[in-house]
Amino acid sequence: MDPLPASPLPNELEAHRAYLYRYALLQLRDADGAEDVVQETLLSAIQSKSGFAGRSSLKTWLTGILKHKITDLVRRRFREAPPPAYDGDEDEAREYAEQHFEGSRRSHWLNAPRAWEDPEQALAQKRFWTAFEACVGRLPEQTARVFSMREFMGLSTDEICKELGISATNCWVVLYRARMALRECLELNFFGQPAAGD
Amino acid sequence: MLSCREVSELVSQSLDRRLGLVERWRLHMHLRVCDACRNFRRQMAFLRKAARNHPALKRKD
C-alpha cells in the first residue's frame, strides 16, 4: 500500500478522522497541529496495519496512536518554550497566594468559593461547554497543555513529568493553578450568571 | 490547623496523588468546619468530571 499522504486512505480509517481531529484539537488548541497529528496517526495506522490485531476497536487503537503523536508534539513544544518552573520560587508563590488569599499567612480566601447550583445539570448545557472552552482557552498555553494531558488524556502526573521533563512538584503546581483559574473563571462566567433562556 | 490556602493545594493534589494519612486527617479536620473549602472540593471534583465528559471525547461507536 502506498503510504504517501496524497493516496486515499482506506475508508474504515478515514471514517474516524473527524473524531481524531476533535480529540487532537481539544488537546492542542491549534488547528494546524491537530491536522498534522491526525495525518501522522492515519499514516502510521496504514503502515502498521498488522499492529491492529482486532484486540480493541479500531477507534481505540487509533486513539492510542494519536495520544502518542500528541504527546510527542507537546514534548517538542515544551523544549522550545518550557513552562515557568514553580519549584521553590518563593517570591512567585507568595505573589500568587496574594491574589487568592488574605490574612498575614494568606490563610483565608479572598473570594470564598460559593456553592454551585446543580453543576451536574450544567454538563448537558451547550452554554456550559462554551464557558468551559473559553475558560480553558484563557489559561497560559503550557498550563493548558499540562491540564489537557492530565484531565482530557487521563495521563498520570508521573507520565506527564517523564514526558515533559518537569518535576512532580512543578506538575502539581501547574495543575493547581490551572484548576484555580478554571474554577474562578467558571464561577464568574457561568455559575454566577443567571441562565439566560438556556 | 491547615489554612484555606494549604487546603486548596492539598485538595488539588488529591486529584493527582494519594495523600498521606496525616494529610488526609488534617484535610478532614479543616473541611469539617469550612464551607468555602468544602465548596472548593466539590468544584474540583466537578471539574474533573466535566473534563472527562467533554463532548469532544464522546465516543459514538
Image: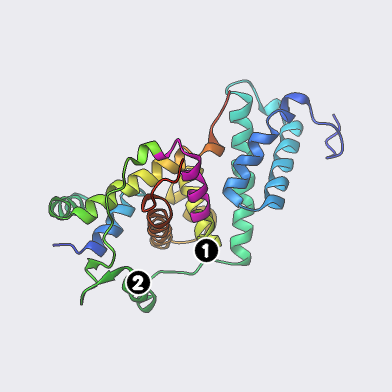
Q: Is residue A73 above or below residue A23?
A: below
Q: Is residue A3 above or below residue B27?
A: above
Location of residue A61 (image quadrant): top right
Labels 2, 1: front one: 2
The answer to whether residue A65 is left or right of residue B29 is right
Q: How many marks?
A: 2
The chain that hosts pointer 2 is: A
Q: Is residue A130 magenta?
A: yes
Q: What amino acid does circle 2 point to?
A: Gln
Q: Label 1: which residue? A: A140
Choose between A24 and B60: the one closer to the eye.
B60
The answer to whether residue A151 is left or right of residue A103 is right
Residue A7, percent from left and from top? 86, 34
Badge 1 local density, few (<14 within 10 Å), some, or many (20+)?
few
Residue A126, percent from left and from top? 51, 40
Magenta segment, principal secondary structure? helix
* Residue occupying image coordinates x 87% and y 39%: A6
* Residue occupying image coordinates x 85% and y 29%: A1
Specify the segment rendered in magenta.
A122-135
Q: Mark 1: which secondary structure? A: loop
Q: What amino acid does circle 1 point to?
A: Pro
**Color encoding of the figure:** rainbow
The chain that hosts pointer 1 is: A
Q: Mark 2: which secondary structure? A: helix
Looking at the image, do the residues carrying marks 2 and 1 touch, with CB atoms under 8 Å apart? no
Choose between A73 and A121: the one closer to the eye.
A121
Q: Label 2: which residue? A: A99
* Residue occupying image coordinates x 36% and y 53%: A192
Residue with the most extreme top position:
A54
